[in-house]
């Protein structure tokens, strides 16, 4: 059972570079989320999507963009990476009925 | 706005000791409450959840939590911890408005010494 799959698992970028993190879920979930996890701050919501073709800002959206062109995929983009974006990024999904969110394994991103 | 407070940032226990982790939330309406666990190097996994009904909720691995509405609390308990319970624990809440937007606490790191 794949569940929620994130790629890549690790990445090192230089300041100013761009990249896209991919999240894929095979549970036919409507809702998908991107979080960042930083020490002592828990998980903070970056962006989320309530369905294919829709996205919305979360708690800390600045510097990130997202797209949900297909129901199963939710992409997180960094157009110009900054050291403050060094973090562990988690994707999650849930259905309308089943409220607990299912999390991916995370992407550890370092910006030098 | 919703917020979640976890008062204990780090907890160190010996095996077989009892555990209680505090969680308080602020939200005026009906809430759904969750405890997630993150083992070292892994993703978050659901320990237990409360939607309605019996305020004492039992989860996996012997964990339980009690919802006390008057205190806006949802504390996590385990009578006897094991070394394998070493992990970070997150309390989370979402308002029962039909939209699944979780707010997480800052987490509690638990270290259980053998």
Image: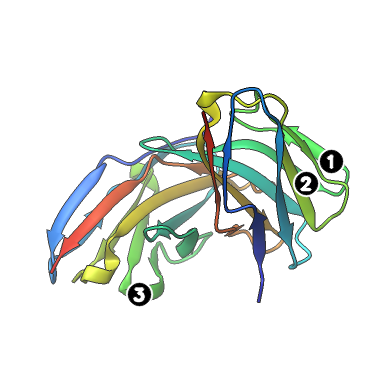
Give coordinates of residue B12: x percent, y percent: 16, 53
In front of the other: A34 or B103:
A34
Give coordinates of residue A6: x percent, y percent: 65, 55
CB-based contact (under 8 Å), mark 2 and mark 3 = no
Instruction: Measure the alpha-carbon separation of dots 2 and 3.
Output: 32 Å
Give coordinates of residue A67: x percent, y percent: 81, 40
Element under disc 1:
strand
Please name the residue shown 18% across and 62% down the image. Answer: B112
Res. B78 visible in picture = yes
Quadrant position of residue B57:
bottom left
Please name the residue shown 65% across and 48% down the image. Answer: B100
| Label 2 Cα crowd, 10 Å radius (few <14 / some 14-19 / many 20+) | many
Looking at the picture, do discs 2 and 3 lie on one chain?
Answer: no
> Looking at the picture, does residue A29 appear above or below residue A68?
below
In front of the other: B7 or A75:
A75
Looking at the picture, do discs 1 and 2 lie on one chain?
Answer: yes
Quadrant position of residue B66:
bottom left
- Tell me the residue that label 1 is attached to: A54
Give coordinates of residue B84: x percent, y percent: 27, 70
The subunit letter for the residue under badge 1 reads A
Res. B98 visible in picture = no
- Tell me the residue that label 2 is attached to: A50
Element under disc 2:
strand
Please name the residue shown 41% across and 49% down the image. Answer: B91
Label disc, if present, on residue B61 of the rendered structure: 3
Query: Viewed as shown, does residue B20 lie left or right of A76?
Result: left
CB-based contact (under 8 Å), mark 1 and mark 2 = yes
The subunit letter for the residue under badge 2 reads A
């Amino acid at each position: 059972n794949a569940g929620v799959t994130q790629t890549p698992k690790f990445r090192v970028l230089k300041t100013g570079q761009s990249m896209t993190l991919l999240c894929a879920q095979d549970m036919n979930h409507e809702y998908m989320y991107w979080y960042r996890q930083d020490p002592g701050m828990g998980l903070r919501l970056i962006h989320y999507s309530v369905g294919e073709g829709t996205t919305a800002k979360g708690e800390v959206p600045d510097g990130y963009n997202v797209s949900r062109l297909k129901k199963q995929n939710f992409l997180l983009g960094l157009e110009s990476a900054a050291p403050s974006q060094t973090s562990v990024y988690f994707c999650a999904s849930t259905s309308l009925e089943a409220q607990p969110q299912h999390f991916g394994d995370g992407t550890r991103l370092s910006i030098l | 706005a919703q917020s979640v407070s976890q008062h204990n940032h780090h907890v160190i226990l010996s095996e077989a000791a009892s555990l209680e982790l505090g969680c308080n939330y602020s939200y005026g309406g009906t809430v759904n409450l969750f405890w997630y666990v993150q083992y070292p190097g892994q993703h978050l996994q659901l320990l237990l959840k409360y939607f309605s009904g019996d305020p004492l909720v039992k989860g996996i691995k012997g964990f339980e939590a009690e919802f006390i509405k008057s205190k806006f609390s949802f504390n996590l308990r385990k009578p006897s911890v094991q070394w394998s319970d070493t992990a970070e624990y997150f309390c989370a809440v979402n308002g029962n408005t039909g939209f699944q937007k979780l707010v997480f606490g800052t987490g509690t790191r638990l270290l259980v010494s053998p």
